[in-house]
Amino acid sequence: MSRSTAPSHAQTPRLWDISPTVAPDSPIFPGDEPYSLRWTAQLSPGCPVNLSALTMSPHVGAHADAPLHYANDGRAIADVPLDTYLGRCRVIHALGAAPLITVEHLHHAEHELPPRVLVRVCQRADTTWNPAFTAYAPEAIEWLAARGVKLIGIDTPSVDPADSKVLDSHQQLRRHDLRVLENLVLDDVPAGDYELIALPLKLQGACASPVRAILRELP
């Protein structure tokens, strides 16, 4: 007599939330607009809902820069195609790399690079403004683009140093038509391959957009 078995259910893929909480004390570039929230309506006998209004730079927290951020003729974030922000991604550890991520920090993980690469340089992502954060060397971005990478990310506020006036790494993004994610939190993410989901909002005319960036375990 044969014995039937109940069908097994596939395990739900693990998710890593790689976005920091956006709050009034979120670290921002000096002079940028911080996050603030006010209530425009609150539950009461005459009001059935709570309603809030937000003020913030689109560069607060995890965000996607639009080409408009670093080129006057670049596309605003609402006009950037979404496909690059969704798909296979590699997390590369370059812990301690400073002041710049160089090609030497990436060589060990270059085999069959997917179109998206996030580099972790922080043991723990900064929760206060740190002007000495690590950025990308322009040559590292050029090297990644030559290997078919279409999106890069980092767990610091920018791919360029805080005091840069020429934004050489952002200009490499422009030349190679790469997308970028900044201010990620990769503290607990092992090196390896994942599915990235980090869609920007369709903000008309904006130079960037917040994202709720996550990584999903591959099957």
Image (cartoon, rainbow, N blue to C red):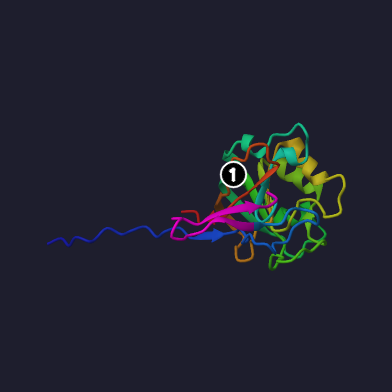
User: Total marks drawn?
Assistant: 1
Give the residue at the far top of this rendering. Answer: 73
Taking the spot 63% from the left edge, 61% from the top edge, the residue there is: 20
Q: Position of residue 199 (x, y in %)?
A: 57, 46
Viewer-side residue, 212 vs 142: 212
Q: Magenta segment, which residues?
A: 37-58
Instruction: Check disc 1 and report its element: helix, strand or loop.
Output: loop
Name the residue: 68% across, 68% down: 124
Amino acid at dot 1: Leu
Residue 144 appears in the figure = yes
Name the outermost residue toward the bottom.
123
Q: Is residue 51 magenta?
A: yes
Farthest residue to the front: give it: 46
Residue 111 visible from this viewpoint: no
Q: Position of residue 91 (x, y in %)?
A: 63, 56
Of 39 and 10, nearer the camera is 39
- Asked which quadrant contains residue 143, the reply is top right
Residue 12 among those drawn in magenta: no
* Quadrant holding the N terminus: bottom left
Which residue does the numbered mark 1 point to in the structure image? 201
What crowding class fits label 1: few (fewer than 14 Cα within 10 Å), some (14-19), or many (20 or more)? Answer: some
